[in-house]
Image (cartoon, coloured by chain):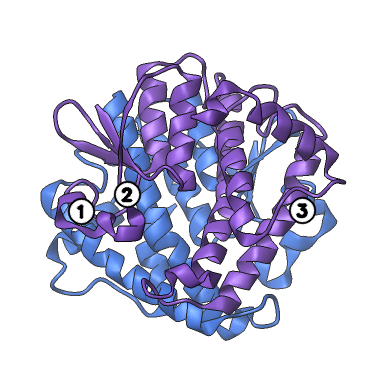
Chain colours: A blue, B purple
Amino acid sequence: MQIFETKTAPNPRRVRIFLAEKDIPMNYVQIDMLKGEQFTPEFRARNALAQVPVLELDDGSYLSESVAICRYFEELQPEPALFGSSPREKAEVEMWNRRVELNFLFPTGMCFQHTHPFFKPFKPQVPEWGELCRARSEAFFKVLNTQLSQQPFVAGANFSIADITALCTIDFARVIQLKIKPDHTHLLRWHQAVSQRPSAQA
Amino acid sequence: MQIFETKTAPNPRRVRIFLAEKDIPMNYVQIDMLKGEQFTPEFRARNALAQVPVLELDDGSYLSESVAICRYFEELQPEPALFGSSPREKAEVEMWNRRVELNFLFPTGMCFQHTHPFFKPFKPQVPEWGELCRARSEAFFKVLNTQLSQQPFVAGANFSIADITALCTIDFARVIQLKIKPDHTHLLRWHQAVSQRPSAQA
């Protein structure tokens, strides 16, 4: 098995942290997105949507979408559970992972793509949309701070994929000039704790 | 248990079809989004993000995010499996459900919100972004047609939540003037088949 990915992008980091938490070794192959290597016919044969990461299985077939790759390994090696254990916990993790994706990770990515000069040659930019996304991302810091004032981790009592998604988004949000404010004390406490886990370096 | 929802919106329909496929009875309470009932303090206590659907559990607590609600019921009543059975199948369903959401359902919703006069008083519109989303949604019809030329259902051999998401999006896409083209014969075959399942009327 091996994973085609781009070290600096937030989605591949989600998968790397997930696998590190499960202590699953993996061979990573770098795809240079700045050079457009994801658009080659060779790469599109792995993922027609030209996105990283892509997992190549031992039978030569491929799986893409970060959360789908994570779920595959959760099924193969359930412990430690990163998608929750009981039905209610699994639903809470799904809910919070999606909330973080929809209201934080995706707007942060869209703001970056629609406002940063780097993307100008590659795709049409709508800066006004990018700014709306920045405001949406910024608002979610408060949602996370409130949630973390009530429980240790994003989806409840246990570390989960929702924490991984939130951590990767917060660290990535620096590219759109957003960071945790000093008065978001609960979010700061959580960020320090999850950043100190060995997996954060994966 | 009961679900607060809005009959005409695509996400609540995903949950209704899912529960109908599992033959799980449910009491549905309508929220009039045209009147802004999702923004009342009473509703925000159920879901701070002011979105439908919301599941109220018997202990008075709440779960939101359509797929989280579906996953909760998949865990409580695994058969028929709508998130896949084997690890590989579960990963394929996750991958395709996400592909349909990210590249089809979400752009369709955003096009609607950014181009339709109805939303003008409620939120800032960026019509240029809405048009980019329309093009993205339109392109995904072809992706689905290609996928369905190779297998009976969106994520493989079995009906799954990925089919539900695709069906709800295609039927909803009429609001942005998109529908299946006559030459997308595989997609037409599939759409006719899934529309004839009793759950499609839920």
Residue at 26%, 30% (x, y): give it: B2
The dot on residue A43 is: 3
User: On the picture, is A139 further left or further right than B21?
Assistant: left
The dot on residue B104 is: none
Question: Can the viewer see residue A50?
Answer: no
Circles 2 and 3 on the same chain: yes
Q: Are marks 1 and 2 in contact (CB under 8 Å)?
A: no
For the residue carrying disc 2, how many other residues have a C-alpha within 10 Å: few (<14), some (14-19), or many (20+)? many
Q: Are marks 2 and 3 in contact (CB under 8 Å)?
A: no
User: Which residue matches tag 2?
Assistant: A163
Foreground pick, B14 / B79 = B14
Circles 1 and 3 on the same chain: no
User: On the picture, is A82 further left or further right than A175?
Assistant: left
Q: Are marks 1 and 3 in contact (CB under 8 Å)?
A: no
Q: Position of residue A48 (x, y in %)?
A: 75, 50
Under tag 1, what secondary structure?
helix
In the rendered structure, the residue with mark 3 lies on which chain? Answer: A
Under tag 3, what secondary structure?
helix
| Quarter of image, res A79 | top left
Foreground pick, B37 / B134 = B37
Q: How many marks?
A: 3
